[in-house]
């Protein structure tokens, strides 16, 4: 067993153990803003801050977790001795993905990447990735050792309900972020084709939308925009861990040119265009953008 496996077990079990407290803290923080912006310049809710504090305290206390970085914090926090590697890991987390959905009571999630390299780390350095979906049921989907397992999280305990999860061969749904007038022409034309083939499923929280793609097959994208050439989503906290999961489930990911796992990190909060789903749709996306 690779030296980091027992630490990865501890990280995943801890995320599951914290999830009920994150979910339990949502009602009391439904409409409360924290009065600050995160390093990406987005309004932070009290629920974001609460989730980040819970995960930082719990994950930072794990022996073997030596770096913690989150979408809500400017810099990487050292949480243990030594550098990532040789059994020590770094954790990159979006503590409450889609927190703007709290006001409308729609799905939200937590996204976690576990790397055996210092942050910001390339997706190829991820030894595990996971997302928690706070839906009607709290579930956790995990990619490690090349395969994907879905768990139900009940009382903070993980129970595997689906092993070796694979994207369905017949795609059904699509979800594209950003405003249509802000899409570059090449993506706009691609989207016009896709919408004649698939059903629209877009809920405004990446975890919920990606879980629809993983469940039914299809494609999710938050593309490059005219107003934001690197799109909206963060490589470390959203793009790379989600790409790890979708690729381990037999799908593909792309920043428009290459796998998100191959994108070289330049800074902790860098944004990246995100496209994930069935390989055929990702290939067509890259061809459309290359024309
Ligand atoms: P928009 C949530 O704020 C998030 O980071 C992702 O979870 C989601 O896919 C996207 O932004 C939604 O963005 O522009 O549709 O509100």
Image (cartoon, helix red, strand yellow):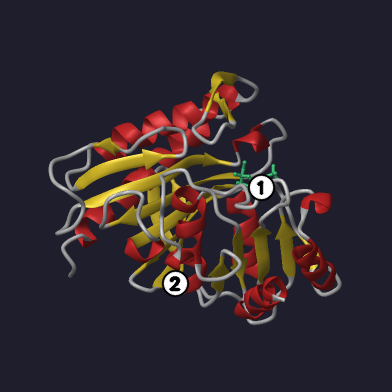
Location of residue 211 in the rendering, given as x and y in whole percent from the top left corner:
60, 59
Q: Determine the residue positioned at 72% across, 59% down.
A: 175
Location of residue 116 in the rendering, given as x and y in whole percent from the top left corner:
25, 58
Disc number at residue 42?
none
Name the residue tied to disc 2.
Answer: 163
Looking at the image, which is closer to me, 199 or 183? 183
Badge 2: residue crowd in 10 Å (few <14, some 14–19, many ≥20):
few
Quadrant position of the N terminus in the picture: bottom left
Tell me the quarter of the picture where residue 73 sits.
top left
Disc number at residue 228?
1
Quadrant position of the C terminus in the picture: bottom right
Quadrant where ligand 1 appears: top right
Location of residue 286 in the rendering, given as x and y in whole percent from the top left corner:
64, 74
Residue 161 visible in image: no
As measured in the structure, the alpha-carbon distance from the residue carrying label 2 to the one carrying label 1 is: 38 Å
Q: Determine the residue positioned at 43% across, 56% down.
A: 130
Looking at the image, which is closer to me, 10 or 241? 241
Q: Determine the residue positioned at 58% across, 52% down.
A: 207
Q: Earlier in the sequence, mark 2 or mark 1?
A: 2
Mark 2 or mark 1, whichever is nearer to me? 1
Question: Considering only vertical position in the picture, is 258 above or below 97?
Answer: below
Tell me the quarter of the picture where residue 254 sits.
bottom right
Looking at the image, which is closer to me, 193 or 62? 193
Q: Is residue 266 left or right of residue 189?
A: left
Residue 268 visible in image: yes
């Amino acid at each position: 067993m690779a030296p980091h496996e027992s630490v990865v077990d501890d990280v995943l079990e801890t995320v599951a153990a914290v999830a009920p407290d994150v979910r339990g803290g949502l009602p009391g923080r439904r409409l409360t803003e924290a009065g600050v912006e995160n390093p990406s310049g987005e309004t932070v809710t009290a629920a974001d801050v609460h989730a980040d504090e819970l995960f930082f305290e719990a994950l930072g206390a794990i022996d073997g977790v030596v770096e913690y970085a989150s979408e809500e914090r400017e810099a990487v926090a050292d949480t243990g001795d030594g550098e990532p590697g040789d059994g020590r890991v770094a954790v990159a987390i979006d503590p409450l993905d889609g927190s703007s959905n709290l006001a409308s009571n729609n799905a939200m999630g937590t996204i976690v990447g576990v790397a055996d390299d210092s942050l910001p780390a390339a997706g190829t350095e991820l030894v595990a990735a996971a997302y928690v979906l706070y839906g009607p049921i709290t579930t956790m989907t995990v990619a490690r050792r090349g395969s994907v397992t879905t768990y139900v999280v009940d009382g903070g305990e993980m129970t595997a309900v689906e092993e070796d999860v694979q994207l369905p061969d017949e795609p059904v749904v699509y979800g594209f972020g950003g405003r249509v007038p802000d899409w570059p022409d090449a993506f706009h034309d691609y989207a016009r084709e896709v919408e004649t083939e698939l059903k629209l499923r877009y809920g405004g929280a990446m975890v919920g939308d990606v879980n629809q793609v993983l469940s039914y097959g299809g494609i999710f994208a938050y593309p490059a925009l005219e107003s934001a050439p690197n799109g909206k989503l963060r490589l470390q906290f959203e793009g790379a861990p989600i790409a790890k999961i979708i690729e381990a489930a037999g799908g593909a990911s792309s920043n428009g040119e290459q796998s998100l796992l191959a994108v070289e990190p330049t800074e902790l909060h860098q944004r990246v265009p995100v496209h994930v789903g069935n390989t055929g749709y990702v290939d067509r996306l890259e061809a459309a953008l290359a024309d």
